[in-house]
Each structure stands twice: as C-alpha cells, then as structure tokens.
Image (spheres, rainbow, N blue to C red):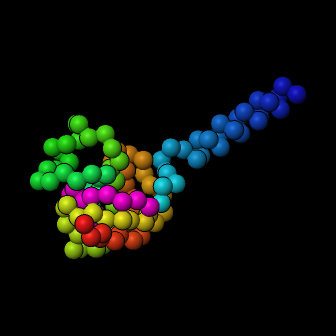
C-alpha cells in the first residue's frame, strides 16, 4: 500500500512538471503598444508616451507581452485588442504569437 502512495505522488509531481509554468491560458487581451520591433510589438496595460521599455521596466509592474506579428503598420501609442495563437511564454515580458491584432479607436 505504501508503494501505491509513493507511485501516486510521483505521477502527480511529474504531471505538474509537464504542465509547467511556461504557458498561460490567457488567450486574448487589450493594451497599448510601447515598442515596435521587427516582426513584434511590446504591449502594456497602460500608455507611456515617448518612453521605451528600458526607461520604465524598473518601475512598471503591470502586464507586458511581446506579440510576434507580421502586421507592419502598428505604431507606439496605439490601443489594440489581440488574440493569441498557441501558448504564452511566461517570461517577463511574456511572449506569444498573435493570431489577431485589432487597432482600437480612442
């Protein structure tokens, strides 16, 4: 009986490790573009005019995500709504592939 519990706990731990903290179920969101780089944009919860991630990263504690996209007309300051394709890498800022990016009118 004791071996059964040990096996159960081992399976439970392994299953938890396989799921891991690397991905999230958050598949959509809204935010403001802070930076535009080649094939990706950095999106934050609030706008920061004329600043870069390097300028604010020490003080900023909200959500931040790099979205990989091939959309070329995106600009810093735009408010967007996005949908994620696949999982989200839980680094900070998070990283993901954008399925849809919609520019919102302010």
Q: Is 33 within the magenta?
A: yes
Is residue 37 something one can see in this rendering?
no
Task: Please tell me which residue lies in front, 47 or 86.
Answer: 47
Task: Please tell me which residue lies in front, 47 or 69.
Answer: 47
Please identify the residue farthest to the front as the structure is shown: 106
Principal secondary structure, stretch drawn in magenta: strand
User: What is the quadrant of residue 14 in the picture?
Assistant: top right
- Residue at image position (21%, 57%) is 35
Where in the figure is residue 62, as x and y percent of width and height? 33, 44
User: What is the quadrant of residue 32 in the picture?
Assistant: bottom left
Where in the figure is residue 100, as x and y percent of width and height? 39, 71
Q: Looking at the picture, does residue 13 appear above or below residue 70? A: above
Please identify the residue farthest to the top as the structure is shown: 2
On the rendered image, what quadrant is the N terminus found in? top right
- Residue at image position (23%, 74%) is 72
Where in the figure is residue 37, as x and y percent of width and height? 21, 62
- Residue at image position (28%, 73%) is 71
User: What is the quadrant of residue 95 in the picture?
Assistant: bottom left
Is residue 62 something one can see in this rendering?
yes
On the rendered image, what quadrant is the C terminus found in? bottom left
Please identify the residue farthest to the right as the structure is shown: 1
Q: Is 12 within the magenta?
A: no
Magenta residues?
28-40
Count of labels in the image: 0
Q: Is residue 17 left or right of residue 32?
A: right
Where in the figure is residue 42, as x and y percent of width and height? 27, 56
């Amino acid at each position: 009986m004791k071996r059964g519990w040990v096996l159960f706990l081992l399976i439970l731990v392994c299953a938890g490790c396989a799921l891991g903290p690397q991905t999230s179920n958050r598949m959509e969101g809204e935010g403001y573009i802070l930076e535009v780089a080649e094939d990706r944009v950095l999106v934050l919860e609030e706008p920061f005019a004329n600043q870069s991630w390097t300028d604010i990263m020490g003080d900023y504690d909200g959500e931040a995500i790099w979205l990989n996209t091939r959309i070329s007309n995106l600009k810093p300051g735009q408010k967007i709504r996005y949908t994620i394709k696949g999982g989200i890498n839980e680094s900070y800022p998070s990283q993901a592939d954008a399925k849809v990016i919609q520019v919102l009118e302010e």
